[in-house]
Amino acid sequence: MKHHHDRGPRFRASFPRPLAKALSGTWVFARTKALIAVPMAVLVLLATVALFADVVATHDPLAQNVEQRLRPPGPGHYFGTDGFGRDIFSRVVHGARVSLFVGFLAVSMAAVSGTGIGMFSAYWGGKLDLLVQRVVDVLLGFPFLVLALMMVVALGPSSTSVAIGIALGLTPQVARLSRASALSIKEEEYVKAAMVIGASSYRIIWRHLLPNSGPPILAQVTGYFGTAVVAETTLSFLGLGVPPPFPSWGRMLQEGVRQYFEAAPWATVFPGLALSVSVLACALLGDAVRDLLDPRRVQTAQPRGQQGVRAGHRQAEL
Amino acid sequence: MRRHLAWRLALIAPTALAASIVVFFALRVLPGDIVRVIIGDVPVSPEVQEALREELGLNDALPIQYGRWLWSMVNGEFGGRSLENGEPIRSIISRHLPVTVLLAGYTVLLSIFVSVPLGVLAAVAGNRWPDYLIRVATLGGLALPNLWVALLVLLGLLLFFRWSPPIIYTAPTADPWNHMQMMVWPTLILAWEYSSHLVRVTRSTMLEGLSQAYITTARSKGLSERDVVLRHALRNALIPAVTMLGLQSGTLLSGALILETIFGLPGIGRGLVQAALARDYPVIQSLASLLVVLSLVVNLGVDIIYTLVDPRFSRAT
């Protein structure tokens, strides 16, 4: 450690600090904002598993092994095996890749198109706004799955068409929210000031409307990621999702139910568990972010009333 | 009030019309030849393809095709016949519609009767165990996919009770016991999800309401806590709850689609899934439009409840 002395005292003193700071910062964050930190950690873990599926999986997800069929969960096969002797843990891990990827793709498309539509509609207003909002109304009248299902039928089964179908179902909802938030920001003094000094439409939308309505949209979109993953799983379960051979949670559920429901309950339980954990994490994170952003829900120091009911007032809604 | 309802009723027609345009053109304008999609990978001679195209009327201009389809939806044929087995779509609908309407109806009724008391209880209990229990339960209802919940319920009934629901659906009038056995689980699962929205809204608006000045006034003039909660706070909390009832009508019908498929109920949702799997275009079009109309009708129903709950409407007649 001798060479450290050559670098001078300042560097030596500051070297371990950023790391320690980051660690203690993370720890403080995890303790004070557990409602955000825990679901976030779960999602990061899931994303890592999906990215490194080849490393995490213990077996080839497609390899069949007749001697090992319908084994219950145990040391060799953490989640057991299915009717073809395929390792369910590895299939769930690889399925995460398909389900989370399609969910992510769908939500990104919905976020971009929905925000775009909402912003422009709010900014230009007038007849364009009216027209766009009627179209959004009509699309909102569709049950979400029906819209996604029709798109999949029309575009043919592939991960892209599933993602487009789901995105189309989510876009009107994002558009509705981003329009509402852009409309309220448009009335702020600083936006009016920007208009008066002659800022371009592009600049107003890009520098004022978008950044300021970003957080609530982000909170909503976080929650919709879970919705999109469920929709992908549901479509695959119905036989309208990503085609074989890629293992997706939905098709694993379908096979589990159709082929060996009673004989191997674990084939139904584990893919569904993975799905539920991801959705729960998204829902919690979305709620927590929304509560964090909503000034009305901020915990304010106020005297508790005599009635028990007041204690819960302004508590973050679980 | 009557004028308001008439206006809402009148608005259904243009919305449904716009929805039918979406349904029709989503399936037509998108890339890909319908005939090819219907045939799939089976090699078929060009003459047969041409005949099929002629039969479906695909050689006419799109607006003409749309007009013809729309007319058949209105005149009671509901879009002609199934491509798969030639059954008139009208008879498919008359078979499937009652099941979905009953399932949705049971769910809405159950949700209303369960969730308003639960929401009030959670709000009044304020951060004590009933509140936590209800909040966790509603979180589960919102976050657990009803697809998986339904499979777990079926699995649990089978493994622990050696019982599974009947396979053949019967109308409530034909065999009420069989009908009940078939409907009870899908209704419960769907109601868990649907009422979770309602409970949460009721709880948070109750909490907000209970901190208002008029509640303090009501308390200080010596009203019993029961009267304060039920007569003053609840009346106002009901309005957002009713709004939520309508907002979630899409969730309700999407959920019905999944549960009908899992529990083998011959409803509109399951019919749509089967048609989608068989690429039965006319049936997909008709059933998808019907689901949209159902969702509109649920919203109209909610509007009617609205006028009953919100005094601003009933007074303005």
Image (cartoon, helix red, strand yellow):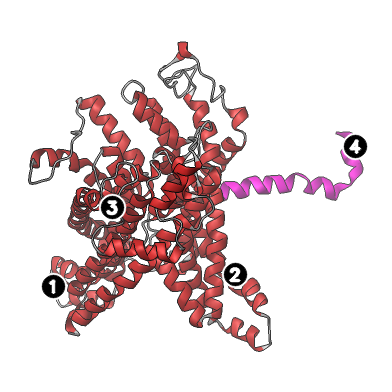
Q: Up-down: is A289 above or below B182?
A: below
Question: Chain ID for label 4?
Answer: A
Question: Gap in Å between the C-alphas at discs 3 and 4?
Answer: 61 Å
Which kind of residue does numbered mark 3 sit on? Arg
**Quarter of the figure with residue B153:** top left
The nearer-to-camera label among 2 and 1 is 2
Position of residue B189 measured from the top left corner of the image (x, y, whole percent) = 26, 44
Residue occupying image coordinates x 45% and y 24%: A79
**Quarter of the figure with residue B289:** bottom left
The residue at which mark 2 appears reads as A210
Q: Up-down: is B297 above or below B154?
A: below
Numbered label attached to residue B223:
1
Instruction: Give the class, few, some or many, for how many residues have Cα within 10 Å of label 1's Cα (few <14, many ≥20).
Output: few
Q: Are marks 3 and 1 in contact (CB under 8 Å)?
A: no
The secondary structure type at the circle numbered 2 is helix
The residue at which mark 3 appears reads as B128
Looking at the rendered structure, whether the residues under marks 2 and 1 are on a common chain is answered as: no
Looking at the rendered structure, whether the residues under marks 3 and 4 are on a common chain is answered as: no
The residue at which mark 4 appears reads as A3
Instruction: Give the class, few, some or many, for how many residues have Cα within 10 Å of label 3's Cα (few <14, many ≥20).
Output: some
The earlier-in-sequence mark between 3 and 1 is: 3
The secondary structure type at the circle numbered 1 is loop
Question: Chain ID for label 2?
Answer: A
Which kind of residue does numbered mark 4 sit on? His
